[in-house]
Every structure is written in structure tokens, then in C-alpha cells.
Amino acid sequence: MTVYAHCKTSTCPFNLQPDRGAKRPRDGDGGSAGGDEDSRGGKQQKGLSARELARYREAAAAAGVGIDAEPVDESSVKKMILTFEKRSYKNQELRIKFPDSPEKFMESELDLNDIIQEMHVIATMPDLYHLLVELNAVHSLLGLLSHENTDILSLIYMSVVDLLQELTDIDTLHESEEGAEVLIDALLEGQVVALLVQNMDRLDEQVKEEADGIFNTLAIIENMAEFRPGLCTEAAQQGLMQWLLKRIKAKMPFDANKLYCSEILAILLQNNDSKCVSLNGLALPRSLSSQVFKRHNPSTAEEQEMMENLFDALCSCLMLPANRDRFLRGEGLQLMNLMLREKKMSRTSAMKVLDHGMIGPEGADNCHKFVDILGLRTIFPLFMKTPKKMKKTGASEKEHEEHVSSIIASMLRNLKSQQRSRLFTKFTENDCEKVDRLMELHFKYLEAVQQADKRIEGEKHEMVRRGEILDDGMEDEFYLRRLDAGLFVLQLICYIMVEISNSGISQLQQRVHQILNLRGGSVKVVRHIMREYAESIGDGKSEEFKEAERKRIMDLVENF
């Protein structure tokens, strides 16, 4: 289908100028139809997105409206880009020549803005993105972003940001991987993230247009990060992480920009290879811990979304062992423990953070500190009874039981001496009621996994009957389905069972085996589950660690 750049007939009811609005709607924006001032001071209708141009052309034709427009092809795009280069150069020349006389270069600035608006149509043809690079347009656009004069921000900067946002729309990028790669490479080579961050610092969010500019700038970063997750580390090193944290911590009313900042921060840390090592002295775990701690529940769904984004970012931070110590020294454990006790909407997320902070040998110090701050008094009531108000937080019963079981399993693995004894004592309290709860969960998840295994075996049998091959990809899919059914929670529960049975406290071992026998359970089944767990443990660890951990677990199993 041919795309048309603009409508020349005065009778055409459609304005074919692309919409320069954000990819995501901002709160309180009711659209600008019939109300926005155009760059020359007149009124114009709300624009259409570049992707809709062809569809509206067909609608216009169906309505009997004549359209006399030039088709947009490679030749016309080259012409458009060259016109942009000429106007950009002319504007720059006049600004240098008459720095103190804005009226001398205002007309050229308006002309430059007009051609930038026309260039939105290029976003419908990502296979021609290479022309933007070959004809130096990307370099020139980035040059406009780095303009030193603040007065240019209100017009040209906003236009360039809107254009880049539409060019990097994720759906458009995936239409032509080759064209997208060329464009993203050129933007990154020109330090686009550093330029965007520098300019966001100069924008005043009290002015609506500039607040929109920040929102659209964040959309550009999100688009590029989604298309190429590897750039998140580079983006963090160009000042984006510091800017996001500063904006989130700013004493400003909650708005769409604050929510978007939390979302970008979570994306940045999730895809950051260095897993958010503190940059320029910024202790991220402590900063994030202080931001997620609130005395009141989020009042809106948007505020709850921001809270979850910040918790996700904190969990990503704790994936790096070095940040476990920062979390400990920043009193992150105390904050999470307080949130668990206060029974707010943040409780499930706080438990997820504790899980990330205490898991593995790197979480040993956090495990000991958690016992020291009386965390056992907090975590075991949550183990004994899953809270009923789970739906409000969007968390499932399985997710809650997985995190609480993982925390207890981590403590059993990491605690030594006095703290370890205090943990085992908890299991003996009130006639071993916690062992009873443990066994209740064991049979609950064992049944769920057995049902899933039965369905999977039936599917495998059917596939073999049809002559289909069970490749590794299919086996991985089946394994993921078993995990989703509750296999991982079952493995954690069985690990706790074998740990307390090896505690040297005969009361605990006897209670575990007594309930197994009463309910028709099997020691063989537990051992089989633990062998499977041992084989899958230690992903991302060294071979020496994996082997030592497997041996430790199998020794526990043999003595079960």
C-alpha cells in the first residue's frame, strides 16, 4: 500500500500529520483534538499516528474525497531528509549570526519544526531507516538534542523527542529488524541516553508540555531497552539510573511520570548485567528500601503498580551478592520485617525481597541478622497460615507459600550455632505444630504435582502414538509445567523435612515419619524429589559449588 505524506486538497477532512503523543496515555490527558496550537500559532486537529495514515487514506477514498498527494518512497524520503539537513544548518547559522535577536532566526526555526513533523511518516517504513543514518539525519537530530540554548527546548527538542519515540516504536522496530538495528546502533553511537538524561534535567515538569516531554523521553528509552535489552547496562552508566532514582525520591505529587520512572528502573535493573552495582556512590539497595517503605497502603492501582515496580527493582539488586551486604548495612532487613508485621499490601512483596536477600551462601549474614531481629516471630505465623487477603495484592497462595518456604529453607542452609538452634526450637513449639503444617503442605503440593505428572505422561503417550519426537525443547516445556504446578515448592518443603529430620532432635524426626506413615506417604518419594532437586540446584554457580551442594543434600537424604 502506498503511503501519502500530506493532503493537498482543501476539501479533505482528514489531517494527515502524524500524532506526536506518547505511546502510553498520561493521566489527565484528554487529547488535543481541536484545541492545540500549531507551531505558527493557529489551530489544528489532533494528529493521527503515522501508522494510521494509510488506513485513513482508504477511508477518505471510500468517502469520495479526492487526495492529491505524492507517494512516500525512497526518493521522497531522501528529499525530505536533505530538506531537514538544509533547514537545520540554516537555523544553526542564523542562531550563530544573531544570537541576541531571536526574531532573526524564529522563521527558520518554525520551518525546521515543520520538516521534523513531516519526517514522522518515515516511521511507517522502517526498511528505509538506513537512509536516516546514511544521510546523517540521526547525527543532526541528536545535535538538536544537545543544543545549549534552553529556549530551543520548548519547540525543537519536543519535536525531536516525539519523532524519535515514533521511530523507535517497538512494533515498528520489529517490522524490519535490519532497519531497526541500523537506527539503534546510530543512536547509541551518538550517546542518545546521555543526551536525553541531560535534557530531562533541564525540563520543568510544572509546565505540561515539558512534563509530556519527559514522559515521551522515557518511552524512547523503554522502546530501545525492549528491542535490545543489552543496552540497559550502557544506559545505567550514562546517568539514567541516578536520574530515575532522583525523580522517584523527589518530593512531588504522584503522577504518570513517577510511575513510568519506576517501570523503567525495574526494566533497567532486570536487564543490567552488572545487576545495579552502586554507581558514583549511589547505594541502590538502601535507596530503594527507603522508597518501598510506606506507612499507608497505595491509594490507587497506579500507586500500587509503582510500589511493585520498586520491589521488583530491589529484588533485581539483590541478585548481585555484593548488594546483599549493602542491604544488610542499610537496615533493609528491619524494614522488610516491619512491613511483614504491619500487614499492609506490601507484605507479599516484602517477603519476596527477603527471599532474594537470604537465598544461597551469599545470604548467610542476612539469615543470621534476621534471627537476631526476631524475624522468626514474624515469618512463622505467615508459614502457619496463608493470609486470606491475597487477591488485593495480586499474589497467589502458591507464591506466598513458595516465598515463606524458601526463606525457611535458606535459614536452615545458612544458620550456624545459636541461631540454628533457635530455628529448630521453633519447630518443636506447641507440640510440633509447625511440623504438622509442613506435612500438610507436603501432601498438598505432592498431590498437585502428581496430577500434573499424570497429565504430562498422558500427553507423552499420545505423542509417541502419533509418531512425534519428544525433543529437548518439549521436555523443557513439560518440566516448566511441573514447576508451575508446584514442583519447586514441593522440593523446598521436602528439603525442610530432611533438614529438621537431621537436626539431632528425635522429636522432629519421629513426627515427620509418623505423619508420613499415617497419611500413606513414602520416604522413597521424598528421596526421589530431593535427588531431582539436587540435580537442578546451583544454576549459575561454579562446578565446585554445585558438586559440594549436591553432596551435602544427598548426605541429608541418606540419613532421612
Image (cartoon, rainbow, N blue to C red):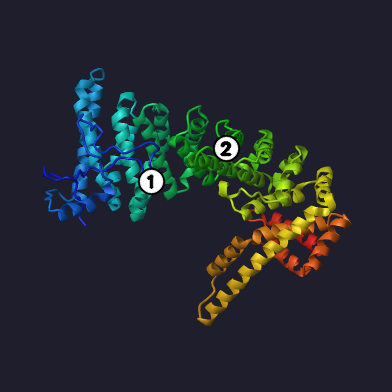
Query: What numbered label is drawn on residue 185?
Result: 1
Residue 138 sits above or below residue 37 on the image? below
Secondary structure of the residue carrying tag 2 is loop
Q: Closer to the camera, 98 or 457?
A: 457
Secondary structure of the residue carrying tag 1 is helix
Residue 552 in view (yes/no): no
Q: Quadrant of the N terminus?
A: bottom left
Left or right side of 280 for 520: right
Kind of residue indicated by mark 2? Asn
Kind of residue indicated by mark 1? Asp
Q: Quadrant of residue 86?
A: top left
Q: Closer to the camera, 85 or 516?
A: 516
Query: Callout 2 environment at 10 Å: few (<14), some (14 to 19), or many (20+)?
Result: few
Residue 333 is situated, as x and y percent measured from the top left of the image, at 68, 38
Residue 477 is situated, as x and y percent measured from the top left of the image, at 55, 66
Residue 344 in view (yes/no): yes
Whole-number angstrom distance, CA of label 2 to CA of label 1: 43 Å
Residue 340 sits above or below residue 500 on the image? above
Residue 443 is situated, as x and y percent measured from the top left of the image, at 71, 63
Query: What numbered label is drawn on residue 106?
Result: none
Q: Which residue is mark 2?
A: 297
